[in-house]
Amino acid sequence: HSFPTRRSSDLSSGKCLAMIIRKNHVVEKTEFYSDPEYSQQVGIIKYPKGGKIKPHYHNELTRQVIYTQEVLFIRKGSVRIDIYDSELIFVDSFIVEENDVVFLVSGGHGFEMLEDCELLEVKQGPYNGVENDKTHFEGKQR
């Protein structure tokens, strides 16, 4: 892959933790950033004027989701995202701004809103409440 910005990787396993698709990232043709084993597919699909997608529906298919993966579209404002590895140790921070896209793949993450923000979140559902869906932690520094 050629990525639109750096990927954060777990230092012990090399596993991808997060990636950012910047608003100014230009593609010549369709590009996907997610690996086949991810439970979300993320990419930019490019069509010329007059291009068509035949009417279709998606077949019923049972999938097993082990980890929830989030995609955030920054609609307004700017956010600092702190990335943690699988051992909950701080790895990296990103500042994302309006029209950037964040793909949170694994590990942990925290957010600080640097301005008033509006985020569009896409992840597997249904949402089962904080007590079932998330584990909060303090995060350790290296």
Image (cartoon, grey):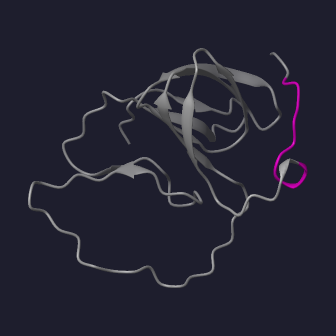
Query: In front here: 109 or 36?
Result: 109
128 w.r.t. 77: above or below: below
**Residue 132 location, x and y as percent?**
88, 55
On screen, residue 127 versus residue 33, left or right, reads right
The structure residue drawn at horizontal position 27% and vertical position 79%, both measured from the top left corner, is 55
Question: What main secondary structure does the magenta stretch of the protein show?
Answer: loop
Quick one: quadrant of the N terminus?
top left
**In the visual, does 18 lie left or right of 6?**
right
Q: What residue is at 59 percent from the left and 60 percent from the top?
A: 39
Q: Residue at x 12, y 54 (%)?
A: 48
The C terminus: image quadrant: top right
Give, as a single range, the part of the protein colored magenta: 131-139
Residue 81, image quadrant: top right
| Residue placed furthest toward the left | 50
- In which quadrant of the rendered view does residue 68 lie? bottom right
Q: Is residue 112 above or below residue 14?
A: above
- Residue 86 appears in which quarter of the rendering? top right
Where is residue 49? Give x, y as percent.
Answer: 9, 55
- 116 is within the stretch colored magenta: no
* The one of 16 and 48 positioned closer to us in this rendering: 48
State the image coordinates of residue 60 (x, y, percent, origin top left): 54, 85
Q: Total marks drawn?
A: 0
Looking at the image, residue 102 sits to the left or right of residue 30; the answer is: right
Relative placement, left or right, of 104 versus 31 is right
Q: Is residue 89 above or below residue 123?
A: above
Measured as percent of width and height from the top left, residue 28 is found at: 18, 42
